[in-house]
Amino acid sequence: MSALLFALLVWLAAWALNVWLAGSPVAKTRFGKALVPLIFGATLLVLWEGLVRGLGIAPVILPAPSAIAAKIATSLPMLWQDFAQTILKGAIPGFLIGSGAAFLTAVAIDRSPFLQRGLLPIGNFVAALPIVGLAPILVMWFGFGWESKAAVVVVMVFFPMLVNIVAGLQASERMQRDLMATWGASYLQTLVKLRLPAALPFVFNGLKIASTLALIGAIVAEFFGSPTFGMGFRISTEVGRLGLDMVWAEIAVAALAGSLLYGIVALIERWMTFWHPSQRH
Amino acid sequence: MSLRQTVLPILTILAGIIVLWYLAAVWMNSTWIYDQAERAGTTVSFAEMVPQTMSLDRPLLPPPHQVGAELWKGLFGQAVTSKRSLVYHGFVTFKGTMMGFGLGIIAGVLLAMAIVRFRVMDMSVMPWAIISQTVPIVALAPMIITLSSQLGLSDRDVPKAIIAAYLSFFPVLVSMVKGLRAPDQMQLDLLKTYGAGEAATFLKLRLPASMPYFFASLKVAVAASLVGTIVGELPTGAIEGLGARMLIGSQFGEPLIMWAALFAAAILAGLLIVAVGIVERLARKRMGVPA
């Protein structure tokens, strides 16, 4: 019980510290902006640890963060193998192929307003569908290896990307396009020098959505058949054996991979669309 | 824009998709037919092969009319209470979706209110809300299900709703934070000159101002909630719901069941989005927004 009380005290103290920090001039600095959420996240872990220890919760229900960390430390090779299979071979190639295909499709139908008017509503609708449901079918087609996982990811990211890129290609203003015309720019020059750069904020918006979808697709596809490693495989088998510390270790890896992928996209966005108002702060 | 300019392109694309689908079905199913013929020691000509690809029991890719027939059989071919009826499974999924959707809206709106009101909430919770969405929920899904069964909840509604809510709260949260902050300083100042307190400012200015944002997010949220529910039905042997139908089709090697369940899910998604659109239009009319 004392562990729980201690954790609650730490939580309250940290919350008070955060309230004070948020009101102080520190909050305006970059350091303060990073510090406050970090403190909040750390106290969540302390509270979790205290809850598990104080109430004596069985590890088959909820393992303590310290137990999960210990599990991560002892099973690094296995985690790396799963990570390589699911993220490096399944999610990332699928993400690149799907986004690339969507980009090419969007540029290909760019000169036909007719096709765009037809494809946009359909793309919007398909983007809202539960495409993960295709996972069992694609696993049946492409086998248990990483190819089927990449295929699921390709289908999942294609439509959200397509809709965003087509919308982005229409984002340049009439005035800007007229200016290009007065300079005698060809279609290709206008595309490369004006409309593609103007589409970038939309493209990155789509890429951010796609980066989380990619992980979902790669992991779900493994529930329908995989080699004897991979994050989805490990999670479903360890849940069956009640090895919840291993499940949480995989979740931690998944969270890290997801945040990392999102972070990389956001970083490239900041670097490539530095001119956009949303990046100037 | 005239009807011709909006509907004709969509129909053209749809027709193109169906043609491509038939071609793909012939191409993908032909291998099996050629193999069968070779095993039987006979040969099939191209003209004989094509009709055969249209009516296999377990096609690699069922042609559209086979999927349509299976879907029709599932939707209208039996009593709605039958375990083989897609209406029944669709209703189970719909129930889960609505529970998760409701939970997601409540969580999203409450969090947004706290974030807009308290600076410390904005600084400490908002980054974690964003990070929460980069965690693939499907990694958590099997665990949420076993966890809830160990806590004595034998029924799968609660874990499904939690997974659906986890996916659907985020769009609501982001839009509501934007919406509740939409009133500009002039409007806030005006309310201050009227002597309005914090509660009155919230109810009479911030909340009405956030409504367009709220409804825009609902369409995304309801689709996300459906995805969450189906994912919640996929792992660890569920028996009810469209996701479970897909799993059953996959485990017993019955592609037609999978495809029919997939299209039933697509129809459900379409209905949900239309329903949200209607609610939005009614609410806008009620609030006096010109359409």
Image (cartoon, helix red, strand yellow):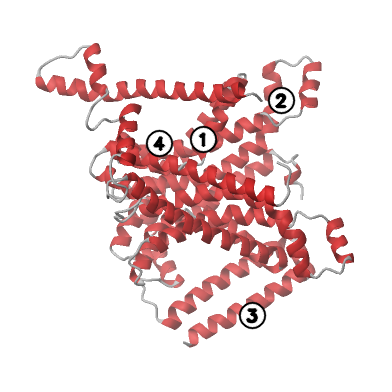
The earlier-in-sequence mark between 2 and 1 is: 1
Give the side of residue A220 with respect to residue B8, left or right.
left
The earlier-in-sequence mark between 3 and 2 is: 3
The earlier-in-sequence mark between 3 and 4 is: 3
Say which element carries label 2: helix
Say which element carries label 1: helix
Say which element carries label 3: helix
Spatial CA distance of label 3 from label 2 is 54 Å
- Same subunit, labels 2 and 1: the answer reads yes
Image point 45% across, 36% down: which residue? A154
Task: Please tell me how crowded label 3 is: few (under 14), some (14-19), or many (20+) other residues with Cα within 10 Å.
Answer: few
Question: Residue A193, labelled with which disc?
Answer: 2
Amino acid found under the numbered disc labelled 1: Phe
Task: Please tell me how crowded label 1 is: few (under 14), some (14-19), or many (20+) other residues with Cα within 10 Å.
Answer: many
Cβ atoms at labels 4 and 1 below 8 Å apart: no
Q: What chain does mark 1 sit on?
A: A
Image point 76% across, 23% down: which residue? A177
Disc 4 target residue: A151
Q: What chain does mark 4 sit on?
A: A
Can residue A134 be seen in the rendering of this structure? no
Give the foreground label among 1 and 3.
1
The earlier-in-sequence mark between 4 and 1 is: 4
Disc 1 target residue: A159
Q: Can you say whether A25 is above or below A264 in the image?
A: below
Spatial CA distance of label 3 from label 4 is 49 Å
Q: What chain does mark 2 sit on?
A: A
Task: Please tell me how crowded label 4 is: few (under 14), some (14-19), or many (20+) other residues with Cα within 10 Å.
Answer: many
Task: Please tell me how crowded label 2 is: few (under 14), some (14-19), or many (20+) other residues with Cα within 10 Å.
Answer: few
Cβ atoms at labels 3 and 2 below 8 Å apart: no
Disc 3 target residue: A13
Amino acid found under the numbered disc labelled 2: Lys
